[in-house]
Amino acid sequence: MTDLLLLPGDGIGPEVIAEVRKVAAALCPDLALDERPFGGRSYDLHGEPLTAETLEAAKASKAVLMGAVGGPKWASAPRDKRPEAGLLGLRAGMGVFANLRPALCFQPLADASSLKRELVEGLDFMIVRELTGGIYFGEPRYIEDLPAGGKRAVDTQVYTTAEIERVSRVAFELARGRRNKVTSAEKSNVMDSGLLWREVVTELHRREYPDVILEHILADNAAMQIVKNPKQFDVMLTDNLFGDILSDAAAQLTGSLGMLPSAALGAPGTPGLYEPIHGSAPDIAGQGIANPLAAILSFEMALRWSLGRPELADRLLAAVNRALEQGARTPDLGGKLSTAQMGDAVLAAL
Ligand code: NAD
Ligand code: IPM
Ligand code: MN
């Protein structure tokens, strides 16, 4: 059985996954790895961004680690064949509805953020993003021609009680092991789906998690609070679209988008999907300067959440911190190291 299926993908994806391979070989040489083309690369080879065979291989592994997908090359591919559609298909196909995106500021990087040191030093909050529902998947969705000229585009935001409850449980459970606070972000002031979200979270909290502190916040205010006073948050629970946007903002607090890993989890016992939250970075792809730490830290999350090796995860986390302490920085963090040199710095610290 494959322990970890690697899906390097496009752009900087293969560059950062190569560093994960190096780290995995040193840290746990017994790990059974496998690899498949995914996203734009799979589309070029097979005419599909996610083949049925790759999805089956993903479901049959203990964990899946994706690099990044997409890029200008596939901008005019039919929408259901675009690399990003492959990623949505993988998330839905694996049933990984809860996406954990930790905004953790490593001590040596407290000065690397564009925000002031005192705002980000010691920062450690977790965004729990709903990942298999909402406007990303709602039907109907289409673009139609209007008789009088012009077009009309429709996307549908849809959530059910059960979808909100299962991701909220993940957030409450996580909070119990942390600082015991959940902040739920939605737009209940203008959206019916936001209203239902708030009702369901409130009711679940009353029934099952009264010991956890629960706060509600409107998503626009959440964006502002993330840059004003991010240390007020412990676990932030939110939907698919708001979670996408708020987690990019949170990433910058940690120094760079190239620092933020993620874990997408489904039902207990099913494989998790691990991915850096950044994209294929077409502006720097091929230059060997991408920061591999988000990918390496995604591997760290896989060791912890799916592969049953928390002690190796602890070692890897400490090695990343140590490499940063010793001054290892890729250009996005204000340094000069290449992708491979940053991987080597983590290896040396291991
Ligand atoms: P992006 O995340 O690829 O890049 C945004 C900016 O951050 C760029 O300036 C890029 O150079 C920088 N950046 C990102 N990751 C970095 C890293 N590891 N090291 C250093 N710098 C890094 O977002 P975008 O430019 O809006 O999107 C590009 C493509 O990626 C699009 O096709 C998009 O759909 C796709 N995308 C994929 C994923 C994913 O695969 N999970 C996530 C986001 C975007
Ligand atoms: C992310 C990305 C994806 C998303 C895209 C590439 C489908 O932005 O993982 O944050 O929007 O979920
Ligand atoms: Mn995103």
Image: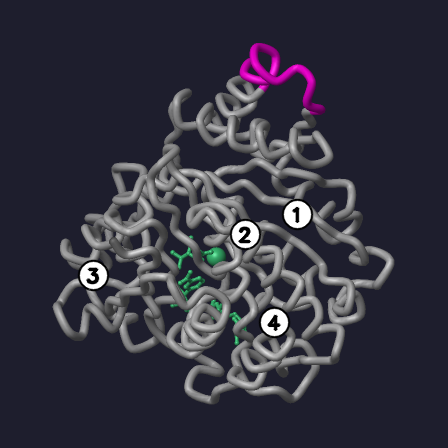
Tell me the mark number nearer the camera, choosing from 3 and 4.
4
**How far from the left and from the top, in percent, is residue 85?**
28, 56
Between marks 2 and 4, how big is the CA–CA gap? 33 Å
Apparent side of residue 100 relative to residue 119 in the rendered image (left or right): left
Instruction: Name the residue at 77% across, 41% down.
Output: 232
Q: Earlier in the sequence, mark 2 or mark 4?
A: 2
Q: Earlier in the sequence, mark 3 or mark 2?
A: 3
Q: Earlier in the sequence, mark 3 or mark 1?
A: 3
Between marks 1 and 4, how big is the CA–CA gap? 36 Å
Residue named by callout 2: 245
Mark 1: few/some/many CA within 10 Å (<14, 14-19, 20+): some
Q: Amino acid at mark 1?
A: Ala
The segment highlighted magenta reads 202-213
Instruction: Name the residue at 35% across, 70% down.
Output: 8
Q: Are marks 2 and 1 in contact (CB under 8 Å)?
A: yes
Q: Earlier in the sequence, mark 1 or mark 4?
A: 1
Residue named by callout 4: 350
The secondary element bearing badge 1 is classed as: helix
Q: Are marks 2 and 4 in contact (CB under 8 Å)?
A: no
Tell me the mark number nearer the camera, choosing from 2 and 4.
4
Residue named by callout 1: 223
Label 3 lies in ligand 1 vicinity (Cβ under 8 Å) = no
Residue named by callout 3: 81
Label 2 lies in ligand 3 vicinity (Cβ under 8 Å) = yes
Q: Earlier in the sequence, mark 3 or mark 4?
A: 3
Mark 3: few/some/many CA within 10 Å (<14, 14-19, 20+): some
**How far from the left and from the top, in percent, is residue 9?**
33, 69
Q: Amino acid at mark 4?
A: Leu
Between marks 2 and 1, how big is the CA–CA gap? 9 Å
